């Protein structure tokens, strides 16, 4: 916070909103990616990385190296999270 130099409340609100949206996008892609290729579970019982980091790495990879998959990422991002315990449903795009 202090390093940003932002002190105006409206700008801080926008900054927090942007950070929250980025975090949610990474989480959404990480959950989607984990369903296709689950994360390794280490010897102590924890996953090798968080779902947010998994999604972040996938998004960065697609944006930098595989831009033709950007449409797929956008479809993942606009799909809502399923209710807890419910299977993921594919959204039909028009």
Image (spheres, helix red, strand yellow):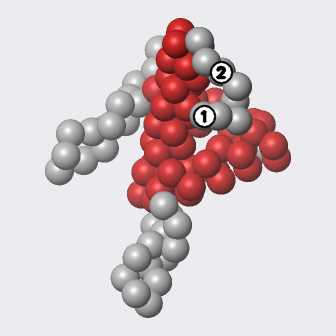
Label 1 neighbour load within 10 Å: few <14, some 14-19, many 20+: few
Q: How many marks?
A: 2
Residue 86 falls left or right of residue 29: left
Q: Please report the residue visible at 48 percent of the width from the left and 69 percent of the height from the top.
A: 39
Would you name the residue on which mark 1 appears? Answer: 1
Q: Is residue 2 above or below residue 56?
A: above
**In the structure shown, which secondary structural element does the residue marked by tag 1 occupy?**
loop
Q: Please report the residue visible at 55 percent of the width from the left and 19 percent of the height from the top.
A: 12
Q: Nearer the viewer, residue 16 or 70?
A: 16
Label 2 neighbour load within 10 Å: few <14, some 14-19, many 20+: few
User: Is there CB contact under 8 Å for labels 2 and 1?
Assistant: yes
User: Residue 46, percent across and down?
Assistant: 40, 76
User: Residue 64, percent across and down?
Assistant: 81, 43
User: Residue 35, percent across and down?
Assistant: 42, 57
Would you name the residue on which mark 2 appears? Answer: 6
Question: Could you tell me if residue 25 is visible in this image?
Answer: no
């Amino acid at each position: 916070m202090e390093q940003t130099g932002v002190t105006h409340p409206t700008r801080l609100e926008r900054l927090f909103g942007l950070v929250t949206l980025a975090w949610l996008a990474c989480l959404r892609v990480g959950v989607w990616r984990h369903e296709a290729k689950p994360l390794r579970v280490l010897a102590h019982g924890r996953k090798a990385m968080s779902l947010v980091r998994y999604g972040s790495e996938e998004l960065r990879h697609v944006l930098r190296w595989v831009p033709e998959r950007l449409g797929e990422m956008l479809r993942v991002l606009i799909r809502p999270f399923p209710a807890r315990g419910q299977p993921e449903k594919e959204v039909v795009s028009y």
